[in-house]
Amino acid sequence: MSYRAELVGLLGQPVDENPTGAMQEAAFEEAHLDWRYVTMEVAPAKLGAAMKGVKALGFRGLNLTIPHKVAVLKHLDELTPAAKLIGAVNTVAIRDGHTLGENTDGKGFLRGVVEDARVEPAGKRVLLLGAGGAARAIAAELALAGVSSIHVVNRDPERGETMVRDLREGTGVSASLSTWPVKVSDDIDIVVNATSIGLYPDIDRMPDIDLGDARPQALVCDAVFNPSETRLLRAARKRGMRTLDGLSMLVYQGAIGFELWTGKPAPERVMKNALRRALAA
């Protein structure tokens, strides 16, 4: 009998309010795996040392969150095709010291749109807020799923233009860019907040967006998971619009990571319930 637990974990800053560990620990218990998930705060200047450390300690995998999703690329041995296209990594598998970077954010988001919101992305027109790692992942997966256009809104035009160019060249999707503020036109089918605006503890914040002309049939999605009902989603529901919260994306991207690390099916229901309990607490 071995008393050695397999280790995975999260690197980011800040991480105190991130409930991913509760979700993954519940999944390990349900699957009868002696694995542990360690949440670790790592400053940007220490990321390289942290990556060497987890390899030396025999970690089996990692999650990366703000601000490390792009910076971690130079510390990895290999990227999946999706991670290369997106230019950001949120999940790493480690085998015999070899690190493979994947991005499950966009895949998790897409599953939520299709399975939970029951919206088929093909042919839809998308308004996407943000141009960071999560935004790039979501945009890439939506483009590959066949949306007709993606309009990106970002405060930094240079970063936004890079993302739009990469989308056009990498997927062929029609992509455009503007800066804040933004008014949602009546031809938009899906609105996505892929920024951290509204994330705990700044729960009273909301993106500078006007929903006044938006179609009631449009779907409004928020990648922010804490709180699960953000000001943006409340504003959308008040107008009778459909919504999708960040819990959906977090659960599905976590399930994909669980399967990548362990090779076993993820207990999604258990993971979602654990997340709800953690956030309620």
Image: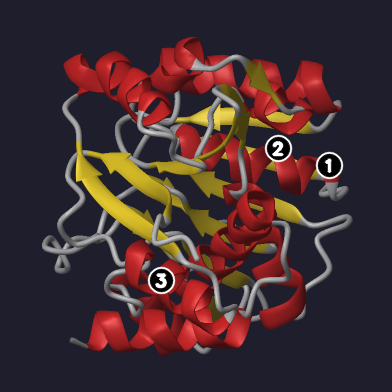
Q: Which residue is mark 1?
A: 144
Q: Are marks 2 and 1 in contact (CB under 8 Å)?
A: yes
Percent from the top left, x then y, of residue 119? 77, 74
Which residue is label 2 attached to? Answer: 140
| Type of amino acid under label 2 | Ala
Disc 3 marks a residue whose amino acid type is: Glu
Which residue corresponds to the image point at 20% horizontal and 19% vertical from the top-left?
46
Identify the element where label 3 is drawn: helix
Estimate how packed mark 1 is, as few (under 14), some (14 to 19) or many (20 or more) residues with alpha carbons within 10 Å: some
* Crowding at mark 2 (Cα within 10 Å: few <14, some 14-19, many 20+): many
Residue 98, image x, y percentages: 60, 22
Measure how far apart labels 3 and 1 are at the Cα level. 32 Å
- Image coordinates for residue 272, horizontal then vertical, percent: 49, 82
> Foreground: 199 or 82?
82
Q: Amino acid at mark 1?
A: Leu
**In this image, 121 relative to 61: left or right?**
right
Q: Nearer the viewer, mark 3 or mark 1?
A: 3
Q: CA distance from mark 2 to mark 1?
A: 6 Å
